[in-house]
Structure formats: structure tokens, C-alpha cells
């Protein structure tokens, strides 16, 4: 869990709700066009499911057709996800604690795996992709959705916006993570999969509620930035104050995360074992 720099559980509820309201329409458009248009999976694993927003979306789409499992390595995330499915009376869901960095001992395979904003938080991406592939039926489909942080921009120009983004990328690098990994990710995924479809999306954050996610994300990683000596209290306060101004300014907007949506199928399932 030490690589995950953001908060978990109740502390991250509002930010993850906002994140889902911004990014779900783009994810769902990709999934409907490239997955559901072809077939409905009978079993789907949402890896790093967070608070289960997308898990519940899948469960609703697959009622009477398939079962959906949400997996996360954080118990506090899973508890919120369980509650979300319960409130919506979704009976075709299950949730489990699991770490995708480690090989699974389970023999259960899924006809589809899904992960969003997960691999960016892992230093051992290749193992995680290999472990994902090993959880898939031979003819199954994996969907990966990962961002490129360097594509963010804002208007009007606030240097602190770019500084916060640069600090975030540096924090990742200091922990052997790449928050800007979408391009190298294609190479990593191709070691195990054929890429069947790819699209790129980038929402515009143009309301205070949407822009607030930038400030909230920065505040969550600020202690790690200071601990890593990438910045100090003084600069954090300065950035926080300017980002607050940016969030509240009527006419300001920014680009959200540029997201790579990738649909992939296994190259050679048996070839993975022991290779
Ligand atoms: C940025 S959140 C995204 C949550 C969700 N996929 C979404 O898009 O709303 C990343 C999630 O991955 C989980 N996570 C981090 N490392 C993990 C690991 N090694 N195995 C499984 N989940 C992990 C975190 O606990 C967190 O809930």
C-alpha cells in the first residue's frame, strides 16, 4: 500500500465521486462501443475498484447475464464499494480484498477484467499486467484505462497549476511510479496482449466542483511531497492558495486527465505461465 499516495476510505469519498462523475461518461462510451457491442461478459473483475462506482455500473449492465467482482487492496475502499452495491440492491456483485501486484492463488478466471487509474500507482506494472492476464479466460478481454498527466493545461495561466502537476509527476518518479505512463504502457500491455481497440479522451474541468478535484488531489499528496523533500510547507501553502483562486474563478478551466482507453485480448495465454 506504500506506493498509493492518495487517501482511501471515507476521506476520499467526495473526490472519488467527483472523479467518477467526470470520467465515467468517457469510460462507459468506450466500454459500450468496444465491449458490450460485441458481447456481454459472463464474469467481470474490476481490479482496483476503489469505491465501486464502475463495478456497480457493470453490475447494472450485466444483470441476468453476468457476475461482477470488485477487487481492491484497501479494506476501507472495499467497505464503501460493498455499501454502494447494497444501496442499489445489486445482487450480481461480490467484493474482495486483493493485491494485483501479487500472483493470485485462485483458479477462478474471468471473461473480462477492467482497471482504471490503477497501473499508474504500481511500481511493478509488468507483474500486475501479467497477473491480470493470468486471471483471464483464454478468450477473455481486458480493458485498461490509464492517464497521461503531462497533458494537463489550464486557462487562464496559473503557474501554480503547472507546478502542482510537475510535483505530482516528480513524486511518482521518486517512488518508481509513472503517473505519465500511458505510452510505455502500450509496450507493457503488448508483451501479453494484442491491442484490439484504443481511444483517447480528455474532459474539460469547467465548474468549481470539477476543478476542486485538482486541489483535493494536491492536498492529499502534499504530505508525501514534503516527506520526499520535493517541496516545503511554504510552497504547499502558496500553491494551495493559488489553486483555490483558480477553482473559484468563474471563467477558469483546465484539461482533466488525458486517458488512454485500451481493449486487449490475450496473445498466448499458455505462453505466460512460467515465462
Ligand atoms: C485512483 S483509485 C481508482 C479507483 C477506481 N478504479 C475508479 O476509477 O474510480 C485507485 C485504486 O486502486 C487501489 N489499489 C492501489 N494499489 C493496488 C493494488 N496493488 N492492488 C489492488 N488495488 C490497488 C487503491 O486502493 C484505489 O482504490
Image: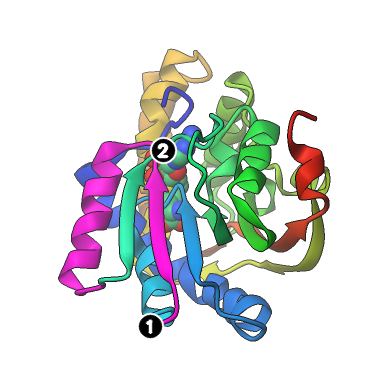
**Residue position marked by numbered label 2 in the rendering:** 98
Taking depth in this image into account, of 21 and 115 the one nearest to the observer is 115
Taking depth in this image into account, of 122 and 99 the one nearest to the observer is 99
Dividing the image into 4 quarters, which one contains the C terminus?
top right
Measured as percent of width and height from the top left, residue 53 is found at 36, 64
For residue 19, which quarter of the picture? bottom left
**Residue 127 belongs to magenta span:** no
Which region of the structure is painted magenta?
A: 64-90
The answer as to whether callout 2 falls within 8 Å of ligand 1 is: yes
Q: Which residue shows up at 48% across the image and 26% down it? A: 3
Taking depth in this image into account, of 257 and 275 the one nearest to the observer is 275
Q: Which residue shows up at 18% across the image and 66% down it? A: 86
Residue depth check, mark 2 versus mark 1: number of the one nearer the observer: 1
Gap between marks 2 and 1 measured at Cα: 26 Å
Question: Label 1 crowding class (10 Å Cα cut-off): few <14, some 14-19, many 20+?
Answer: few
Q: In screen coordinates, is 93 left or right of 186? A: left
**Residue 85 belongs to magenta span:** yes
Dividing the image into 4 quarters, which one contains the N terminus?
top left
Q: Is residue 17 above or below residue 120?
A: below
Under tag 1, what secondary structure? Answer: loop
Q: Is residue 161 above or below residue 156?
A: above
Q: Which residue shows up at 49% across the image and 65% down it? A: 43
Question: Label 2 crowding class (10 Å Cα cut-off): few <14, some 14-19, many 20+?
Answer: some
Measured as percent of width and height from the top left, residue 66 is found at 44, 73
Looking at the image, can residue 147 be seen?
A: yes
For residue 81, which quarter of the picture? bottom left
**Residue position marked by numbered label 1 in the rendering:** 64
Q: Which mark sits nearer the N-terminus, 2 or 1?
A: 1
Measured as percent of width and height from the top left, residue 112 is found at 58, 63
Q: In screen coordinates, is 180 left or right of 204? A: right
Amino acid at each position: 500500500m506504500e506506493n498509493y499516495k492518495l487517501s482511501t476510505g471515507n476521506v476520499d469519498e467526495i473526490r472519488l465521486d467527483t472523479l467518477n462523475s467526470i470520467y465515467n461518461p468517457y469510460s462507459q462510451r468506450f466500454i459500450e462501443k468496444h465491449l458490450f457491442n460485441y458481447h456481454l461478459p459472463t464474469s467481470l473483475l474490476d481490479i482496483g475498484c476503489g469505491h465501486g462506482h464502475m463495478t456497480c455500473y457493470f453490475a447494472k449492465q450485466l444483470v441476468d447475464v453476468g457476475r461482477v467482482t470488485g477487487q481492491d487492496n484497501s479494506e476501507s475502499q472495499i467497505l464503501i464499494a460493498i455499501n454502494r452495491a447494497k444501496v442499489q440492491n445489486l445482487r450480481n456483485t461480490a467484493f474482495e480484498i486483493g493485491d494485483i501486484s501479487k500472483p493470485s492463488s485462485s483458479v477462478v478466471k474471468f471473461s473480462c477484467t477492467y482497471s482504471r487509474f490503477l497501473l499508474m500507482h504500481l511500481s511493478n506494472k509488468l507483474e500486475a499486467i501479467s497477473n491480470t492476464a493470468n486471471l483471464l479466460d483464454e478468450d477473455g478481454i481486458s480493458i485498461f484505462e490509464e492517464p497521461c498527466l503531462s497533458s494537463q493545461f489550464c486557462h487562464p495561466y496559473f503557474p501554480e497549476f503547472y507546478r502542482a502537476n510537475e510535483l505530482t509527476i516528480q513524486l511518482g518518479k521518486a517512488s518508481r511510479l509513472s503517473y505519465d505512463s500511458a505510452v510505455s504502457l502500450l509496450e507493457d500491455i503488448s508483451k501479453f496482449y494484442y491491442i484490439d481497440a484504443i481511444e483517447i479522451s480528455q474532459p474539460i474541468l469547467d465548474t468549481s466542483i470539477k476543478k476542486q478535484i485538482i486541489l483535493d488531489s494536491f492536498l492529499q499528496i502534499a504530505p508525501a511531497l514534503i516527506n520526499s523533500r520535493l517541496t516545503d510547507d511554504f510552497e504547499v501553502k502558496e500553491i494551495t492558495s493559488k489553486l483555490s483562486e483558480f477553482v473559484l474563478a468563474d471563467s477558469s478551466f483546465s484539461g482533466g486527465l488525458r486517458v488512454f482507453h485500451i481493449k486487449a485480448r490475450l496473445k498466448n495465454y499458455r505462453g505466460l505461465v512460467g515465462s
